[in-house]
Amino acid sequence: MEPPVVAVYDANVLYPAPLRDLFMELAHSGLVRARWTDAIHDEWMRNVLANNPALSRDRLARTRDLMNEAVRDCLVTGYEGLIEHLDLPDRDDRHVLAAAIRAGAQVIVTFNLKDFPASILSAHAIEAQHPDEFLAALFDALPAAVRAAVERQRERLRNPPRTTEELLATLEGQGLIRTVARLRSLPGPA
């Protein structure tokens, strides 16, 4: 992977706050040219609200707005006309592929790999990657930069603050097994 790769973040990567924070840090740091759409925002926000009714839509809208402000050229538009011409196992994921095509993305970062078959994506020079696969490859290319991004994420955690090991355990619990193993293999804090 030659950074900065253009990557569309699927809603399931933005749904859990720890992953969203890490993937935002990678984008804000310029390690990834992150892209998403208003539809992707709507999907992760809808699911967060469904599973956490105590949160307010206004709070999530503020998070969405801050994300859009933090990452230059993150919002993909003008992709809607491509949707009807695409065929995926889950028709509801066609908007993600359409956005990736429109953005010139090389990667869709998603947990739902089965919904983005390589046989379909390869025709568009796009690959679907699990977040752990994506981050492990980024780490292999730029270990010090990824490590610094994780440390900046940890430093921002205030309520409650987290030790490096606590953050790594959280990320591991989110499915970043290989990435966390790589981070732990380096001496000193993440």
Image: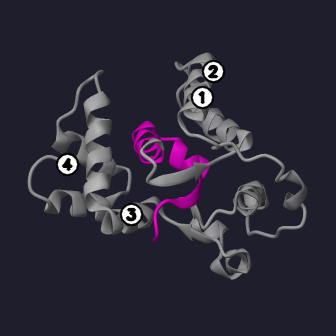
**Magenta part of the protein: which range?**
1-27
Count every numbered label the image shows and give the total: 4
Q: CA distance from mark 4 to mark 3?
A: 15 Å
Instruction: Determine crowd level at label 1: few under 14, some 14-19, many 20+ residues with C-alpha closer than 10 A.
Output: some
Which residue is painted at 46% across and 69% down in the image? 2
Which of the marked residues, 1 or 3, is nearer the chain's N terminus? Answer: 1
* Type of amino acid under label 3: Leu
> Is residue 92 visible to us here?
yes
- Vertical side of 178 occupied by 81: above or below: above
Residue 56: x percent and y percent?
58, 17
Which residue is painted at 17% across and 36% down in the image? 163
Which of the marked residues, 3 or 2, is nearer the chain's N terminus? Answer: 2
Name the mark on residue 49: 1
* Numbered disc in front, either 1 or 4: 4
- Vertical side of 159 occupied by 118: above or below: below
* Numbered disc in front, either 1 or 3: 3
Task: Give the residue pinned by disc 2.
Answer: 57
Name the mark on residue 190: 4
Residue 41: x percent and y percent?
65, 38
Horizontal side, residue 127 vs residue 101: left or right: left
Whether the residues at callouts 2 and 4 have beta carbons within 8 Å, the answer is no
